[in-house]
Image (cartoon, rainbow, N blue to C red):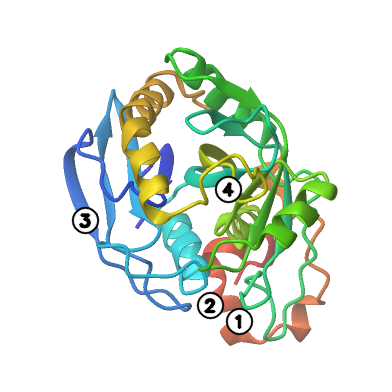
Amino acid sequence: MSENIKIAIIGGSGLYEMNIIQDSKEYILETPFGKPSAPIVVGNLKGCRIAFLARHGLGHHLTPTEVPYQANIYALKSLGVDRIISISACGSLREDYAPGHIVIPDQLYDNTSNRRRSFFGDGLVGHVSMADPFCEDLSNQLEQAVKTTHAIIHRGGAFITIEGPRFSTRAESGVYRSWGMSLIGMTTAPEAFLAREAEICYAVMAHVTDYDVWRLSEETVTVDMVIQTLNKNTSIAMEVIENIALHLNSTRTCNCEHALADALITRRDAIPNKTITKLEPLIKKYIGN
């Protein structure tokens, strides 16, 4: 089923379609982990084969917890995707990351409690390194693409993922700041973890929509506030994606494609055949038939 797709875009709140993709077609896929959030749109952009997936589904009907993260990443892997850029709305937990700015984080803290964080289990154990959860090479390319726009960009910072769908209390927001967190959102974990298990490069273009609720001089965060800021940034996001498509490195120079090389610990003859079949797109180069 591989489409030789160079990169996939996962759109978050406010970004549900990409009209800049040409000659597009939709894939409605079934995976061992269920259906993806929405049909995957595949087409051409600036000579680059690209895929797009609306994280929360068409019409935004999936809460952050309900997003089928495993199915989404598995489906993209099945189509041959080896790089993903996540476009994510987030709150800022620091003064200098202001609403309207774009941040490319370099660290991730998972504060969720009700999500499947791994493809492994059912007789196959894998321990994947997540010390640096975002691909530095893809993040570098994303940074350069954002710098060609008029957007204010920041590089680095720890991104905390909360369960949602509610926003934080002031006490929670204050605690996250005391922990040294820079950004807060609801979907980057487990998406980044699953991408690494699938040996897919993953980077985040985080659009700051608000100051969460810690900054008492600011209006309390609302859905309307988030969407208004995202609507303003949509043209920037499209420009960045076009730049990425035009200048994306033809080959990967990172280690993401070898993430499972030393991660699988279960003895081959102890792995159930049904598990091998289920995870075939992820493990075939290590397990074989």
Indicate the amino acid at tag 4: Ile
Provide residue 203's location: percent of width, then percent of height.
58, 39
For mark 4, what is the residue? 200
**Can residue 141 be seen by looking at this rendering?**
yes
Residue 279, placed above or below residue 13: below
For mark 1, what is the residue? 275
Marks 2/3: CA–CA distance: 23 Å
Provide residue 126's location: percent of width, then percent of height.
76, 68
Find the residue positioned furthest to the left.
Answer: 23
- Mark 2–mark 3 CB contact (< 8 Å): no
Q: Secondary structure at mark 3?
A: strand
Q: Nearer the viewer, mark 3 or mark 1?
A: 3
Q: Earlier in the sequence, mark 4 or mark 3?
A: 3
Q: Secondary structure at mark 1?
A: helix
For mark 2, what is the residue? 278
Q: Secondary structure at mark 2?
A: helix
Point out which mark residue 9 bears.
none
- Mark 2–mark 1 CB contact (< 8 Å): yes
Indicate the amino acid at tag 1: Thr
Find the residue positioned furthest to the front.
Answer: 217
Q: If the image is split into quadrants, where does the N terminus sit?
A: bottom left
Marks 2/1: CA–CA distance: 5 Å
Provide residue 158's location: percent of width, then percent of height.
73, 43
Q: Nearer the viewer, residue 142 or 285?
A: 142
Q: If the image is split into quadrants, where does the C terminus sit?
A: bottom right
Point out which mark residue 26 bears.
3
Residue 33, placed above or below residue 272: above
Indicate the amino acid at tag 2: Lys
